[in-house]
Amino acid sequence: MAKDIEKFFKGQVSAWRTLVETKKEGKEKSDRTKNPPIAISRDLGTGGRFIAEKLACCLNYKLYDKEIIELIARERKIHKELIETLDERTRSNLELWFEGIIKGKMIQASEYITTLAKVIRSLAELGGVILLGRASNIILGEGGGLRLRIIAPLEYRIKNLVKYEHYSEDKARETIKKTDSERSQFLKTYFNSNIADPLNYDLVINRACFSSIDTIVKIITDMLSSITLKEIGSC
């Protein structure tokens, strides 16, 4: 299993680096217009990942979630665990310095953001990808792909964590509060953006209004076919 995972990541890194090089040489035309990338921002407890997985299966797209961390770690030649300390969180350079001592190499927040943007943009240019979280909707910008936000009322989210993660209600509430704060602060600090601003998305879906994920997937796929693309990050 470990070898299979390693082989998968090596393949992803190789495809990504090949794309970057061929773009530089002007040999590659983007598949983005044929298979527009999808960026999904989701609140914890909304089932956003399940929606992303179903959507990827339906469209035959590749889903990138934690794989983005792996690509960044490989690009920066830094241990994955160090990247995870920055993932959708804000950390001071002093904190990162201490983490670097423990993990073996230091990374500054600005380096992480620069590499994150590079990875997201390169994956988006490949087309046929779903990018889960990590400010991908901000990095793509208006017209860079289909940008989605999955939300739900707090009580709905708490019930989901209790049901599927077997949390107590108190733990579910506290986990949601902490995660919401981290993700919101991450966007505000590094992208000067409000996670709740509807103008950062092409479609906002209230998960509590739909009993079936299939219905949500159909709405998204119908919208994908009519999206007008621009240069990534042009707006």
Image: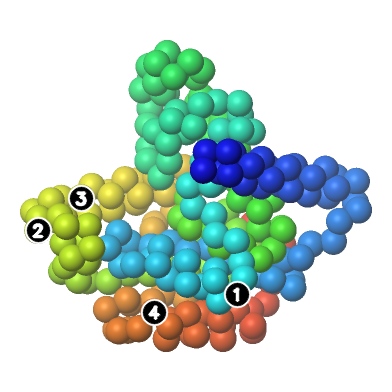
Instruction: Locate the C terminus and report the quarter of the image it occupies.
Output: bottom right
- For label 1, the residue is 59
- For label 3, the residue is 175
Q: Which mark is residue 169?
A: 2
Q: Is residue 163 above or below residue 138?
A: below
Ranked by sequence position, the earlier of labels 1 and 2 is 1
Image point 51% across, 26% down: which residue? 79
Q: Which mark is residue 228?
A: none
At mark 4, the secondary structure is: helix
Image point 9% across, 55% down: which residue? 168
Ranked by sequence position, the earlier of labels 3 and 2 is 2
Q: Is residue 159 above or below residue 1?
A: below
At mark 3, the secondary structure is: helix
Q: Disc 2 marks which amino acid?
A: Glu
Q: Is 178 positioned to the left or the right of 233 in the image?
A: left
Alpha carbons under labels 3 and 1: distance apart:
32 Å
Ranked by sequence position, the earlier of labels 2 and 4 is 2
Q: Is 207 positioned to the left or the right of 146 in the image?
A: left
Q: Disc 1 marks which amino acid?
A: Leu
- For label 4, the residue is 213
Where residue 232 appears, x then y in whole percent?
67, 59
Nearest to the eye among marks 3 and 1: give it: 1
Alpha carbons under labels 2 and 4: distance apart:
24 Å
Nearest to the eye among marks 1 and 2: give it: 1
Where residue 98 appears, x then y in whole percent?
38, 16
Alpha carbons under labels 1 and 2: distance apart:
36 Å
